Amino acid sequence: MEFLELLEALAAFGSAHGRMKPFTDFAKASGILCIEFQHTIAGQMPQKNFLYRNTESPLKNSKNVRAYSSVRTLTDGSLYTLTLHASNESPLSQEELELLPRVLLKQQMDNTLSTKLEYNLFHEAQMGFYTPFYGMRILHRLVGENKIEAFAVMFFNITNLGRINSMIGRDNGSIVVKNFVKKAEACLREPEVLWRFGGDNFGAVVLKQNLPNVLGILRGSDTTFSPKPKDVIRVSAATGVYECTDKSKNPSIMLDHALSCMNMARFTKRAPVVFYDKQTENLLNHMKSVENDFEFALENKEFVPFFQPKVSLENNSLVGAEQLCRWIKQDGSLIPPGAFIPVLERSKRVCQLDFFMLERLCVCIKDWIDKGFTLVPVSTNFSRMHLGNQNLAQDIINIIDKYNVPHNYVVIEVTETTTENDTRCLKELVFTLKKHGISCSVDDFGVGYSSMALIRDVPFSDLKIDKSFLDFNNDTRSRNTIMMQHVISMAGDLGMSCIAEGAETKDHIELLKKIGCFKVQGYFFDKPLPIEAFEMRLKTKIYPDVL
């Protein structure tokens, strides 16, 4: 083989070992004994590997062997060295033997840098997982090979990562996420693939027959964040799954379906894993309809205030109310809160709704003042989605003052927070509003993760005890009742009052009296009332015939 033919063989060879034979034949015929490639980084052991070795004629006598090297230095200071060992009896000329390492080194570096470029293109830097580009590449390949029907596309989001970070710190939280996802990734085999698409969100293409193994990890797994055996935390993920069919041809649509199911699992609490099916499709269409109709509904005041009274059990009198939102469309149909509030929380449009409802409340209170009614404080709900708004307290105050409403008639009702940052923001909000004479109450108290710390640090005026604490058997010795009794006592010592939600039966009322909770809200006294009916309650204030 002539030298120019060798260069053609090298060009064909590249890094694909299946094309090695032309070069191997030439090397043997040319007395080349081995070719060594070395990468050296300052402060690290050199990385060596052989591009070629002639096992039939190993290096035995260095006196009969000549070495030819070529070295290149990169901008980062690392060195690439290629050394060719040839027999003194090689038929190649000195010039050819000196040129050959330079050609080989250039080609090997091109291959190495190309591999690095491909790695960087398809791997994200922070945790080293594949990028969405690579996931899309695999999907297109499976569709092109008509193999997609055997696979499912999935997206998952780490559940309560904020709480995990607040418990063990952000750095350890990142380690937990990586270790947890690595567990799921370890279940995969080519061409299955898992990728990260930002934050604590991940995607995967998985064989349908392998779904139980992967979902078994994602539903909940004890995960370490240090070598210490005790440093373990339970981690799970909200997951959406789209099972591909022979009609699945568009990877973007497959990904959209899986992503929508994941968001449903996250925001609607329907299940930790949501599969795409006809029922899911209908629900997704409903969610899109809610989002599409929201602005029109807001402009046309389709969101209507209803008021559920809060009643004192000491004299069965009206002592307050909660404003609740009802969506009554122009055709008269009613969309219940559970069908649109979770949807609006996905895009934070619920924040627009909360401010709209605060304005509606202020309009009502101003009207009642003008009518000469004796008023009671009325609470209105604010989602925790507001807590990223640094001007939230001032925005609330500005709206109340816009309608010249006395601050003591408006109560801002919030739900428990689950992260340290949210709790800090909530604390600032409550303190600021309190300085301006606006009270705050905490809704659904007792179902979150930070209840005790919350009432220790935040000066709420009221605790609304979640209805799940109400025992249905009127047993004052039950665990629920004992806990509720201590919460009521502790709240009183901290200067807060308790309101029991979900009081629906006479047994509930008797139990609440026994444990010292004398403010209630529930269907036993009144369901949520439209404005006109609630105005009648404002006039009478007493429930004479209830008990």
Image: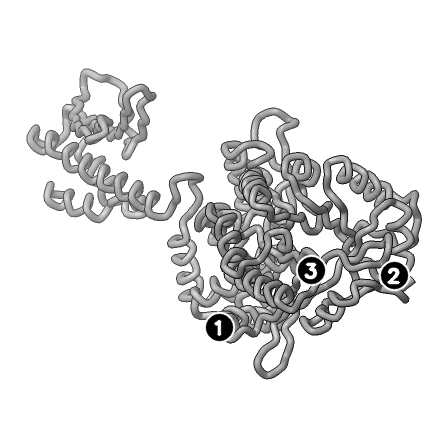
Quarter in which the N terminus is drawn? top left
Taking 541 as reference, is 168 above or below it?
above
- Circle 2 packing at 10 Å, graded few (<14), some (14-19), many (20+), is few
Q: Secondary structure at mark 3?
A: loop
Q: CA distance from mark 3 to mark 2?
A: 27 Å
Q: Is residue 379 left or right of residue 491?
A: left
Determine the CA span between mark 1 and mark 2. 39 Å
Direction from residue 533 to residue 61 in the image, left or right: left
Question: Disc 3 residue type?
Answer: Leu
Q: Measuring 16% from the left and 22% from the top, which residue is drawn there?
A: 66
Q: Is residue 195 above or below residue 371?
A: above
Q: Position of residue 251 (x, y in %)?
A: 43, 65
Q: Give the residue type that dot 2 points to.
A: Thr
Question: Which residue in the structure is indicated by mark 1?
Answer: 299
Q: Is residue 151 above or below residue 493?
A: below
Q: Residues within 10 Å of mark 3 (few under 14, many from 20)?
A: some
Q: Which residue is mark 2?
A: 505
Q: Residue at x 16, y 25 (%)?
A: 68
